[in-house]
Image: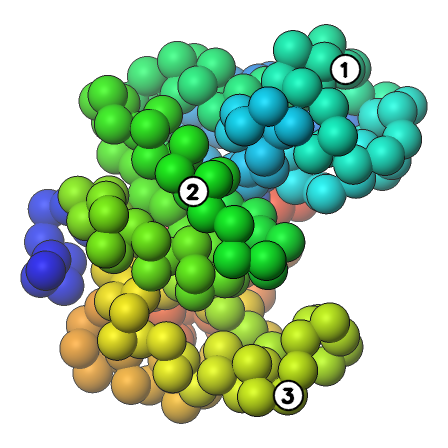
Amino acid sequence: MRRPFDPDCDWLTQVAIAHRGLHDVGNGIEENSLPSFEAAIRHGYAIELDVQLSGDGEAMVFHDHSLDRLTSETGSVHDRTADELNAISYTNGAGTIPTLAQVLDLVAGRVGVVVEVKSRWTGDTRLVQRTAQCLSSYRGNAAVMSFDPVQIAWLAHDAQHILRGMVADGATQDDYPWLPLATRLSLRQFRHADITRPDFLSLDKHWLPCPVSRRYRKTRTPMICWTVRSEQEASDALRWCDQITFEGYSPKVPTR
């Protein structure tokens, strides 16, 4: 088990983390696109990105389950092959939907990468397994996180060498209308901790401080928060956590 703030974890707290890359649609840079990651690298920020599973089992860098918001296509990401998704352009930005492998080739260890595994909450672990495969030969700072304990528990059991984290918020009914109350309480209270054993936490800034953050602060577990959109929000958040995930402005480098 990793020690808090050992060399494997330090990079998570050294510089601010660009949420879905350093995107700016007004200048033709869409979220989770190769141009957004290139921009983050140029400015010296770490990168947060999301992965979804394609119909043929590839890890695609895309936030939504549906293609509708960011492209002129419609329907589920899961219904398309990786090659089909890789050919789809963004409606308001340059580039096409990349695979995780393509993003890792681009970053090439120049900044840290935090991969959020998006879940459909069905118990399916194919996406986190494919993510682990992509990272198995990567030579750079990288971590994997998810809201879904099933995904992180898989890493804790089957890929312990990968830095793993839990993403969390207050788990309200508004946030998780499809989950029963017992499951939401389990998320809110971190009842999964014995099987997920997170190396770090990524918490909603609106949830800070909370019982979970106070508990993990005592163990000096690295803690980042999301999503910060101004210097004032950053100042407020950094009272309770170690680093920010940001968008919509450019923090100083390093933040702390």
Residue 190 in percent (x, y) is at 40, 80
Residue 6 visible in the snapshot: yes
Residue 104, above or below 11:
above
SS under mark 3: helix
Residue 181 disc label: 3
Residue 88 disc label: 1
Residue drawn 72% across the image and 13% down it:
84
Residue indicated by mark 2: 128
Q: Nearer the viewer, residue 45 or 92?
A: 92
The crowd level at tag 1 (other Cα within 10 Å; few <14, some 14-19, many 20+) is some
Residue 108 in percent (x, y) is at 32, 17
Residue type (three-letter) at the residue carrying disc 3: Leu
Residue 28, above or below 177:
above
Q: Nearer the viewer, residue 31 or 157?
A: 157
Residue 35 in percent (x, y) is at 60, 18
Q: CA distance from mark 1 to mark 3?
A: 38 Å
SS under mark 2: helix
Residue drawn 59% across the image and 34% down it:
53
Residue type (three-letter) at the residue carrying disc 2: Val
Q: CA distance from mark 3 to mark 2?
A: 26 Å
